[in-house]
Image: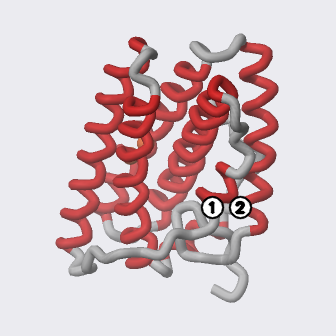
């Protein structure tokens, strides 16, 4: 079960599907960033032996998603290109605390929330996209992102006892929902709503 504080409005999916090319490009970037986040944690925490193999496997899986997205972009003749980052990631991470243990806990929980939001929205897109190949692919990704959400929560469980973990996850989930509510309506996997779209 995903620990999101607020669900995306169902109407988002049709709106996003109407901006298909931008959403797919953004999604390719998201898979690349997800791989990078896992690799960064390996670099920053070599002392955490229990983190290394699961995060390495996660990074490989995210890169395989990235490659699959590149193939979809090519099939649909959408050029991969540089993209200006949206405000979501920076604002979400603004609540990450400074001391090492808290920073690790918060970073893992932010990763868990990003995976949860991806999971939710890929599921919505799978139902809204009229391209059968893409819809089937998104359905398979939906399950993978739910698994990634759980992995990050499990890793956070090695950093903090369950009471502390649950309380902090709830705080950060509230923050994540606020960030999305305040994010301008961008056709992004982690963009805001539909106004003016
Ligand atoms: Fe992924
Ligand atoms: Fe993921």
* Viewer-side residue, 74 vs 154: 154
Residue at image x 63%, y 30%?
Answer: 1
Is the distance from the Cβ of mark 2 to the nearest ligand 2 atom less than 8 Å?
no
How far is mark 2 from mark 1, CA to CA? 7 Å
In the displayed structure, would residue 3 be above or below residue 77?
A: above
**What is the secondary structure assignment of the residue under circle 2?**
helix
Residue 142 place in picture, x, y as percent: 45, 44
**Residue beneath disc 1:** 88
Figure label count: 2
Residue 39 showing in the rendered view? yes
**Residue beneath disc 2:** 180
Is the distance from the Cβ of mark 1 to the nearest ligand 2 atom less than 8 Å?
no
Instruction: Identify the residue at the far front of this view.
Output: 99
* Viewer-side residue, 119 vs 182: 182
Residue 185 place in picture, x, y as percent: 66, 77
Residue 141 showing in the rendered view? no
Please identify the quarter of the rendering in which residue 154 is found: top right
In the displayed structure, would residue 12 be above or below residue 19?
A: above
Using residue 12 as the reference point, say whether residue 115 is left or right of it.
left
Residue at image x 27%, y 79%?
Answer: 78
Using residue 15 as the reference point, say whether residue 42 is left or right of it.
left
**Disc 2 vs disc 1: Cβ atoms closer than 8 Å?**
yes
Residue at image x 19%, y 72%?
Answer: 74
Residue 117 place in picture, x, y as percent: 59, 49
Q: Quadrant of the C terminus?
A: bottom right
**What is the secondary structure assignment of the residue under circle 1?**
helix
């Amino acid at each position: 079960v995903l620990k999101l504080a607020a669900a995306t409005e169902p109407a988002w999916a049709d709106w996003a599907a109407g901006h298909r090319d931008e959403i797919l490009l953004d999604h390719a970037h998201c898979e690349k960033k997800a791989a990078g986040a896992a690799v960064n944690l390996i670099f920053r925490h070599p002392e955490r032996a229990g983190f290394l193999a699961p995060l390495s496997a996660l990074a490989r899986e995210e890169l395989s998603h990235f490659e699959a997205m590149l193939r979809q972009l090519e099939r649909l003749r959408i050029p991969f290109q540089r993209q200006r980052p949206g405000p979501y990631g920076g604002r979400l991470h603004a609540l990450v605390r400074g001391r090492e243990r808290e920073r690790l806990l918060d970073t893992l929980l932010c990763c868990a929330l990003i995976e949860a939001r991806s999971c939710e929205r890929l599921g919505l897109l799978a139902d809204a996209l009229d391209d059968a190949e893409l819809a089937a692919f998104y359905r398979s990704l939906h399950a993978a992102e739910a698994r990634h959400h759980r992995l990050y929560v499990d890793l956070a469980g090695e950093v903090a006892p369950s009471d502390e973990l649950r309380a902090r996850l709830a705080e950060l989930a509230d923050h994540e929902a606020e960030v999305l509510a305040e994010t301008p309506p961008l056709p992004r996997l982690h963009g805001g709503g539909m106004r003016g779209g």
